[in-house]
Each structure stands twice: as structure tokens, then as C-alpha cells.
Amino acid sequence: MDPIADDSSMPTPAPNTFIVPPIFQNPEADILIKSSDNVEFRVWKPMLVEGSVVFKDMFAHPQSSEIAAGPVPWPEPAKVIDRLLTFIYPIVKPALDSLDEVFTIIRAADKWQIDVAVSYLKDVLVSKRFSSSSDDAFRIYAFACEMHFLDVQDEVAGTASEWDPFDSALREELSHMMALDVLRLTKLQLYPRTAFDEHFDDESESTAPDTIQPNAVSLVFQAHDADMAIVSSDGIEFRVFKLYISGSSTILRDKILQLPSYLAGSSLPTLSLTLPSAILETLLYYIYPVPKPYSSAMSLEHVMTCARAAAAFDIGVALQAFRQELVMPVRLRSYPLRIYGFARSMGFEEEASRAKSRAILRDPLEHRKRSDFKELTAHDLVVLRDSHSALMNNLEAALGRLHYPLLYECQHDEDPDPSRRATFGATLIPAMCLAMTDTALFSTADLFHLFGEQSCSMCGIHFPDRFNSSQEIMMEVKQVLDEHIMLE
């Protein structure tokens, strides 16, 4: 029987079996690597150590000889490992098949800290093969945002801006982008010759409160009969009572239980926390049942930093207070955008909702304080922009349904009282703004008929006081919003 004609007894190779190149099957090599799909590579250990920081640290471990004795698992598919090894070895680099493959290899190279591969592939991303297409450029820009490749973002932003980042078809690409990343593309599209920084007018801010040491630790936290000490990251000591600290947080309680016991007359058991003294002192004020000396004067940045710390250490009594501080009216009026982004990042849904109702009164794309976008994700910005647009469309539609009487010449109204008209304008427009909020008591139609139609007290002829159309009202509403008129 011809063995070639009848090969039923011969094993059939799996259709997707990966064939390892001969260079990675060297029988003299000293390390056997095994992929996540059970493909083995025999390679040189010095190559791995020089090429990958992760492998360098792995083989520097005291038990590295045991690790190298058997197959070393490398939890990546064989094809990915093959690509990574070509960058580690001094051989010709093969062309990559697609943009998706470039993304996959870069993610793996970044994870295993194979810097030579990351550097090479970043150049591939900005090459004409990929970056000249606006479709690919947008995907590259989004990927660069995910990986924090600022140089790649700079290279492809111009071409990527040919797409509207708010297009619903592109929403999936925004998942790893921040609000400022999206805003950059929008501004580039509208103002291609204007530097991004010129769209903001942030004033220089003083040193953040959380970076400043207290002038002196409060006497409350210098108790001579304290039974423990807490030391801040900047070396300030607070002498406190375990009962208060352990009662405020299970995390702190567990840390206290791990402290060594001490004898009378010896130094206090000391707990070191990675918190600046200004933040630590503020937290202690909320843990202790004492008056809060400067709660009304805390900056928003200080409140947010304290809230993060309270959440990290699960100090519920402090976190509850900081969440309330976050949405104080004076802060919501000035920083709705920033508070919304922070509340969203912390999972504070109620606070986010309250901040959103303020933030959408203005177009977020026209906001000129860069620091207020710092906490916002791209998704957050999309939600705010869509909500603002819907709000303005609803207002315009409501105004469009109103009836506007003809203008009449009235002999008794030849010299209208300018103060009355000024009062009318100052009343109607803020009322319109207020009507746009969730808690409005009047509809826009109610407000127009309440303020918009006047009649001569002598002859009874009706005439509109100052507006001829909904468009005029909308223009003034937008002007007021742009001037940051916010109502309680």
C-alpha cells in the first residue's frame, strides 16, 4: 500500500498550529519558554534579560535557577511572543499585518517592559502607512491616549481631528480618552491654527493646600496622655487616641492592631500614613468630636483630596462630610464641571447629578478653565455636551410654540420708561435660565406670558415689551449663560 495514497494513519496538523521560526528553536539555547497556547520557544536567557525589564527582575530573583529549570510560562499567545522576540533578538523585523496587530504587540511590549519594541512600534504608528488615513489616525489617537503616548498624540492629532469625536459611531473609541483629549480634537477642527493652550485662560493658582504643612499641630492632636502617634508623609507627628482612630475605620483599626505593643515609659506606637499633614489633620478634625475650624474656607481641591483619602481609608464619618462639602452652593456655582467629573470618578451619583444640572446650563466645549476638565472622562464630556444641546433645543422648541402679537404703535407709550424695561429684562432672562433647571416651577411659555406681553394702562392695547421672537430671547439667554449668571 502506498503510504502517500493512504495517509489516514498520519496525524493531521491542527489548522491554526503556530510554526516557531528556527531561530527560536535553538537546541543550544538555555531557556524554554511556553506560550499561553502551549507553544514552546527555546531562546537565550541573556537575550530575555537584556530585552525585558520584567524578565530581568524575574531571573534576578534568588529562586531564578528553579524558574529556568523547567518551561517558563509566558502568558501571551505564540504569535505575540514571536513578534516580541524579534525585537529582543538582533534580526530583521517583519512587517506587521494590521493596525490591530500593532496595538496588540505594543500592549504586550508595554506590559513586559520591552522598551525597544515600544519605541519601534510607536514609529510604525505615526508612519504614513497608518497615520495618513483619518480613520486610522483617529484610532491611533485614541490608542495613544490609552497608553499615554503624548508624542504619538501630537503627531496624529491634526489628521484625527478631521473626524467629529462626538459622532455616535465613534463613541466606542472614546473609552480610554479623557475630556481634554476629545476637546483637543474639537478645537483643532474648528481652529486649526490656534494652539490648544490658547483656548484656556486659567489663572496661576497658589500652592495647593494639601502640599502645605500646618503652621502648628492643633493642641487637640498633641495630647500628653495619647496612646499612639500618627506620622504624616511629610514627617509631622499627631499624638492621638486609638479609640477614636480605630472606631472611625476598619482599615485603620487593622493597621493599629499590627503595631507592636509598648511598655509604660517607652515611645508611643507609631502609625505612618502616606498622607500630607494638611490632609491628615483635616481628617482628624472630622474623626474627633470637635468643632471644624475652617470647613467653610476649604478650597475645592482640598475637599476633593480629603474625600479621596477618606474613601481610601474607609473613614465613613469624614467621607459623608466631604461629600456634603463638595456640593455646597458656592462650590456648585463656581465649579460644576469639575465637581461633576470628580463625583463621577468617585461613584458619588447624587453629587454628580446635582453638579450636572448646573454644568449643562453652559456649553462645556466653550468653558475656558482647563483645570476644570481634569477629572472629566471623554464619556463625561459627551454626556454634558449632549445634555446641554438637548436642554437648549427644548427651550428653543418651547419658545417657538409661543404666539407673538404684532407690534402696535401706542400714543401713550412714545417715551417708555427705560428703568421699567431694564427691570423687565433683568427679571425675564434669569427666570428663563432658572426654568431650564430640573426644579423649575414655571414652563418657558408661562414665563413668556407672565413677563413678555405688556399692555398700555391707558388704552389697553397689547404689545410685546422688548422681544419680537423666540430667537431674540434665545440670544439673551445664551448671553446670560455665557456671563455665568447662576441662580439659587
Image: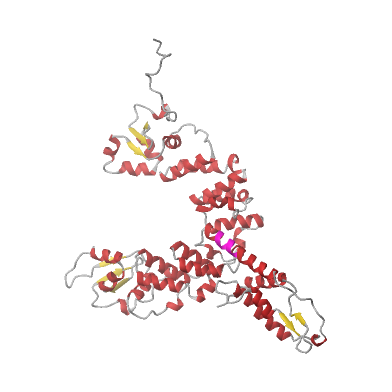
Q: Residue at x 74, y 78 (%)?
A: 466
Q: Residue at x 52, y 60 (%)?
A: 380
Prevailing SS of the magenta stretch: helix
- 97 in magenta: no
- Residue 190 can be seen, yes or no: yes
> Quick check: 410 left or right of 209?
right
Percent coordinates x, y for residue 255 in the rendering: 27, 64
Q: Residue furthest bottom?
A: 458
Residue 246 lies in quadrant: bottom left
Q: How is the image coloured?
A: secondary structure
Percent coordinates x, y for residue 19 in the rendering: 43, 28
Residue 136 lies in quadrant: top right
Q: Quadrant of the C terminus?
A: bottom right
Q: Quadrant of the N terminus?
A: top left
- State whether residue 288 is above or below residue 53: below
> Quick check: 114 left or right of 480?
left
Percent coordinates x, y for residue 302 in the rendering: 44, 70
Of 319 and 44, nearer the camera is: 319
* Image mark count: 0
- Residue 191 can be seen, yes or no: no
- 387 in magenta: yes
Q: Residue furthest top?
A: 1
Residue stretch in magenta: 382-388
Percent coordinates x, y for residue 231 in the rendering: 31, 68
